[in-house]
Every structure is written in C-alpha cells, then in structure tokens.
Amino acid sequence: MDRLTGGDSSLLRRINSAVTLRALRDGQALTLTRLAGDTGLSRPTIEGVIEDLSGAGLVAEVGQAPDGARQRGRPARRFRFRAEAGRVLGAEIGAHTVRAVLADLTGRITGGCARPVDEALGADARLSALREVVDELLRRAGVTREALWAVGVGTPGILDTEGTVRLGTAMPGWTGLELGARLRGWFRCPVLVENDANLGAIAEHWRGSAAGMDDVVFVLAGLSPGAGSLIGGRLHRGFGGAAGEIGALHLLGREASPERLLSLTDTPLDPLDEAAVARVLRLAREGDAVARGARDRFLRRLVHDVAALVLAIDPQVVVVGGWAAGLDGVLEPLREQLGRFCLRPPEVALSALGEEVVATGALRVALDRVEAQLFALEPAAAGGDRS
C-alpha cells in the first residue's frame, strides 16, 4: 500500500464524502448550511461533496420545506440520502422454512416472503425453493436482482468463512455443501453466509430484546439447540466457527438426547420431528402429567446447556428464540436454574423478533457490508462492482 501524505486529495475527498453521508443517513433532509455545521466542513467543500454524491446516485435534492411558511428570498436547498439507491436482502434456509426479507440502504424493511419446505428436501430442491421466494419478493417490491448491494444468508450448521457447510446435520445433503459459492452464482453482489443462531444474536442486538447490550447469548432452542454469542458487541464464532453448538452436549450421554427427554414412554420418541414435539407440548399444556414430565426434562437439559455457555461468557442477557420460546413458563425455569448454576445470573428474555429473527440478522450482516463500502476510505464505485 502506498504511503498516504497530507497532500493526498483523493483520500481527503473520500473522508469528506463519508462524513457527509453519515450526517444524512438518519433520513432527515438537511440544508448545506446545516451540513456544514454538522460535519465541520466549509460551505464550498460541502457543495462539492454533495455534487459528487448526487452524481453517484446517493444523494438527492428535495423540495421546499413542507411547513408551508412563506420565506423571503430564495429558499435554502435541502438534500437527503437516497436510501432507495440500492437494496439489501436477508434470507434464512431452514429445515422447515425458507424466508427472505428486503430492506433499503438504511435497513428499513420493505417486504418479506416465506415458504414452508419439507425437512426431507434435498439441497438442490431447498435452494430452488429459496430462489423462488427471493424472486417472488423482488417481483412484489418491483426491483431487480441487480438492485441488490449485498445479501446475507443464515442456515444451521458449522460454516467456514467462505460459506461452505463443514457440518450440517439438520438437512439432507448439507454437510460439505459449498453454499456460499452456489449463492454467489445467483447474485451480482457480495453474499455472506452465517450460522443461524449467530445471526439471531446479531438481530436481537440490533433491534430486539438485547438492544443496547453488548454481551449477549441468543439460544435458538429447537430439537438440537444452538446458540450465538456477542462479546463486547462482536460476534464470537470460535476458531473453527463451531462456538455455541450446545446441542452437541447430548453426545456426552445418550440418555440425555432429545428423543429420550421428550418421550412419553420407555422408548425414544420416533420420529423426532416438530409434529411429535408439538404433540408433547400440547398435552403438557392440557395437564397431562407424563407430558409435563417430558417437557420439564427437556427444559432442564436446555438450562444445563445454556448454563455451560453462561458460565464461560458471563453475558448480560440470554435471549431465547426458536419454538421453545413459545413454551409456557420457559423464562421462570431458566431464571431459577441459571440462578442456581451461575455465579452471576444474567437477564433472561424471549426473542422480540419471532420467526424472522434469523433473516433479520442476515439482513444486518448484509447492511454492515454495504456500510463498509459506503464509508470506506479506499476508492470504490458506488453501484458498480460490489463484490
């Protein structure tokens, strides 16, 4: 890299552009005088920056102030960030659902689409279902695939930095799938692939139950629970991307496996699927003593798994998502047991984002990529090659 000097006017222009874009990102239309005051740049400098950003399609001039007040002389020109200049997409590829959400460049969600899929579906068919959901979403929104600036995708399993699934037992044909490479063949923009529970932690920190908290554990409580963690506001993936795979703890003792914990008889629950689990939970709610015992055993195991992570990380909050978030009274047993097992019990809360938590986290990851480009000090062509 060439050494930067005080006379590097190109770098100075990029700094000025980034500062001005940040001032406009909250959606408020500002005058040149206000922009100069907010950024500390001179009026002539701001005029030049606005001209460049307008040419790049990132800033637009708006009409006269809507208050209708009569003004003497020429009204001040006002400018806004063009959030519609591009789109970001967040998607989830799950065992039972594929889902996508669409947002503008400020992260404002403008649409969503989801479709149930069979858990026995192969990898190719599952990816085709996602493609159909994305195409339907874009069609409804009236935007083309070329309008996407970045795409985030969440899925179960252990993934490497390129988006290859190193281990994925939740869906057929998932282990070894070069998911990132497959998806990048569809889109003309960056595609970022991440574990679903990790994205749940990111989503809840962004606009959910963990907003404003930087040490977070998000538990995606399903048949094989997983967890995502933020430490100091940053995602902790682990050396090989396997951090938070608490569902593997049952391998330490087969008697503690989900199919045994949720069984209403002396034999393991077979098949172990969402319908079978839903039946057990329904019977427990209706007062069936055996079903209550099965539910309570499962909750105790979940507490055991979560407590191991809480002791290691000491989070401020544990957020529970996934179908277990709908269990009657799940919070109180978690609070009580974590209070027994942990030196400093964390807050415990249900997910505020429900079924869209993974796709919302994927959207946040995509938006982070776009913001890194918009505010980069290295030269990049807005709206051009974003790979």
Image: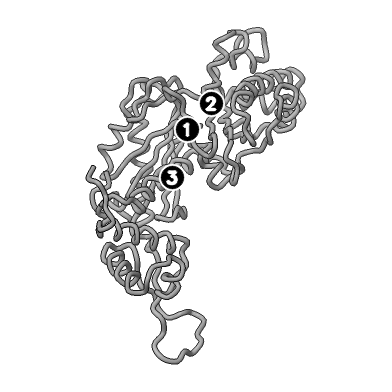
Circle 1 is placed at which residue position? Answer: 196
Could you tell me residue 325's position as x and y percent? 63, 34
> Residue 276: x, y in percent?
59, 22
Residue denoted by label 2: 226
Estimate how packed mark 1 is, as few (under 14), some (14 to 19) or many (20 or more) residues with alpha carbons within 10 Å.
many
Q: Which sits in the foreground, 50 or 109?
A: 50
Distance in Å between CA atoms under marks 2 and 1: 9 Å
Task: Give the mark, 1 or 3, whose residue is nearer the N terminus.
Answer: 1
Q: Residues within 10 Å of mark 3 (few under 14, many from 20)?
A: many
N-terminal-most mark, 3 or 2: 2
Q: Position of residue 92 (x, y in %)?
A: 44, 37
The kind of residue on which mark 2 rests is Gly
Distance, label 3 to label 2, CA atoms, is 20 Å
Horizontal side, residue 186 vs residue 352: left or right: left
Using the image, determine if residue 25 lies above or below residue 168: below
Q: Which of 273/144 is in front?
A: 144
Crowdedness near tag 2: few (<14), some (14–19) or many (≥20) residues, C-alpha within 10 Å:
many
Q: Nearer the viewer, residue 36 or 320?
A: 36
CB contact under 8 Å: marks 1 and 3: no
Residue at 71% from the left image edge and 30% from the top image edge: 345
